[in-house]
Image (spheres, grey):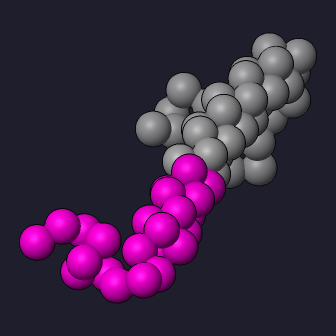
Amino acid sequence: MTLATMLGPYASFIVASYAIVGAIVVALIAWIALDYRTQKARLRELEAGGARRRSGRGVTDIA
C-alpha cells in the first residue's frame, strides 16, 4: 500500500501540511538557538563593561 492510497484523495495536502509545519518548527529552533547565542554575547559585553547582575552570577556561571 502506498502513502497516497492510505491517505486518500487529500494525500498531497496532508504531506504538504506536515512539511510546512516541520520547516516552521526547524526555523523556530534555529531562531531560538541564534538568539540564545546573541543574548549570551550581550551579557558578556555588559559584564566586561562593568555591569553586574542582581543575582551576582556571571554569564559563565550559567549553563
**Does the stretch in magenta take in 49?**
no
Q: Nearer the viewer, residue 18 or 29?
A: 18
Return the x and y of residue 58 as percentages of the image width and height.
63, 32
So how many labels did they put on this image? 0
Is 34 placed left or right of 5 in the picture? right
Q: Residue furthest left?
A: 1
Q: Residue at x 54, y 26 (%)?
A: 60
Q: Residue at x 88, y 16 (%)?
A: 49
Residue 15 versus residue 55 in the image, above or below: below
Q: Nearer the viewer, residue 16 or 30?
A: 16
Q: Residue at x 56, y 51 (%)?
A: 23
Return the x and y of residue 31 as percentages of the image width and height.
67, 42
Residue 38 versus residue 53 in the image, above or below: above
Is 30 placed left or right of 49 in the picture? left
- Find residue 45 and report its image quarter: top right
Residue 23 versus residue 2 in the image, above or below: above
Predominant SS of the magenta segment: helix
Q: Nearer the viewer, residue 28 or 45?
A: 28
User: Is the N terminus in the top left, top right, bottom left or bottom right quadrant?
Assistant: bottom left
Q: Nearer the viewer, residue 24 or 43?
A: 24
Q: Which residues are magenta?
A: 1-25
Q: Residue at x 50, y 57 (%)?
A: 19
Residue 7 makes an appearance in the image: yes
Residue 57 makes an appearance in the image: no
Return the x and y of residue 63 as percentages of the image width and height.
45, 38
